[in-house]
Every structure is written in C-alpha cells, then in structure tokens.
Image: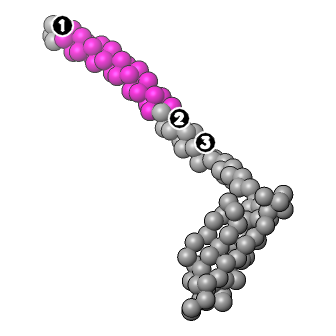
Amino acid sequence: MEHWNDDVEKSKSQFGRNNQSMKKRTGRSLEFAYAAICFKFAVMLLSGCASEPVPVYAPAPSTFDRALSAALGAARDEEVQIVSEDRVSGVISGTRGDQEVTVGIAHASGR
C-alpha cells in the first residue's frame, strides 16, 4: 500500500505545483488584460477631447470689389445682359434690348 500512497502523494504534489503555476500565469494574464482594457479606455477618452478647428481668416473684400459687385447686381436688376466684366479696370459691359450699356467704377487711388 505504501507504493500506492506514494503515487497519490506524488500526483497531489505535482497537481499542486501545476495548479500554482497556472494561478500565477492566469493572474498575470488577467493583470495584463485589465491593464490593456484601462489603456484602451484612456485612449478613447483622450481622443474624444478634440478641440474645435481654428477658423480660417478670410479678408473682407475691398471697397472697390464691393462697389463693383453692387454695380453688377444693379445692372442685373435692370435686366441688363452682362457681356463682359473687367474687374481690374472696373468696367462692366452689357446690353438691354437694343441699347449697349457700360458701367465704370473708378478706383479710389485714381487708377
């Protein structure tokens, strides 16, 4: 019977050692999994804090450009068909019925 008891004791001690090493491995795996989950959660929280984009500065149109646009709008309101517009020289050409229409806008600098 001693032989049988020795075998049982050996298997118990082997099972105990394996069980402890499994606990160690499982504990480390769980610690790693918890750390990975916490890291992912932190990354998700921080990535959600995006700042609003900075608006792009668009300079206001010059007084000349506003005057030229107003003249174009007025010509269209009077049913003038615009044939050409030269923004550099400030000249708008068009027709209304049989009449030729020319609108000129002078630059403040005298160009």
33 displayed left or right of 19: right
Residue type at numbered disc 2: Phe
Q: Nearer the viewer, mark 2 or mark 1?
A: 2
Which type of secondary structure does the marked residue at label 2 adopt?
A: helix
Within 10 Å of disc 2 (Cα), the crowding (few <14, some 14-19, many 20+) is few
Region of the chain picked out in magenta, as a range: 6-35
Q: Residue 73 in the image: x percent, y percent?
A: 67, 80
105 displayed left or right of 31: right
Which type of secondary structure does the marked residue at label 1 adopt?
A: helix
- Compared to residue 33, the image places residue 13 above or below, namely above
- The residues tagged by marks 2 and 1 sit, at their Cα atoms, a distance apart of 55 Å
29 displayed left or right of 3: right
Quadrant in which the C terminus is drawn: bottom right
Within 10 Å of disc 3 (Cα), the crowding (few <14, some 14-19, many 20+) is few
Q: Nearer the viewer, mark 2 or mark 3?
A: 3
Q: Residue 49 in the image: x percent, y percent?
A: 63, 47
Residue type at numbered disc 1: Glu
Q: Which mark is residue 2?
A: 1
Q: Main secondary structure of the magenta part?
A: helix
Q: Nearer the viewer, residue 92 or 55?
A: 92
74 displayed left or right of 39: right
* Contact check, label 3 and label 1, Cβ < 8 Å: no
- The residue located at (46%, 28%) in the rendering is 32
Residue identified by numbered label 2: 39
Q: Give the mark nearer the N terminus: 3 vs 1.
A: 1
Q: Residue 37 in the image: x percent, y percent?
A: 49, 38
- The residues tagged by marks 2 and 3 sit, at their Cα atoms, a distance apart of 11 Å
Residue identified by numbered label 3: 46
Q: Give the mark nearer the N terminus: 2 vs 3.
A: 2
- The residue located at (44%, 24%) in the rendering is 28
Q: Give the mark nearer the N terminus: 2 vs 1.
A: 1
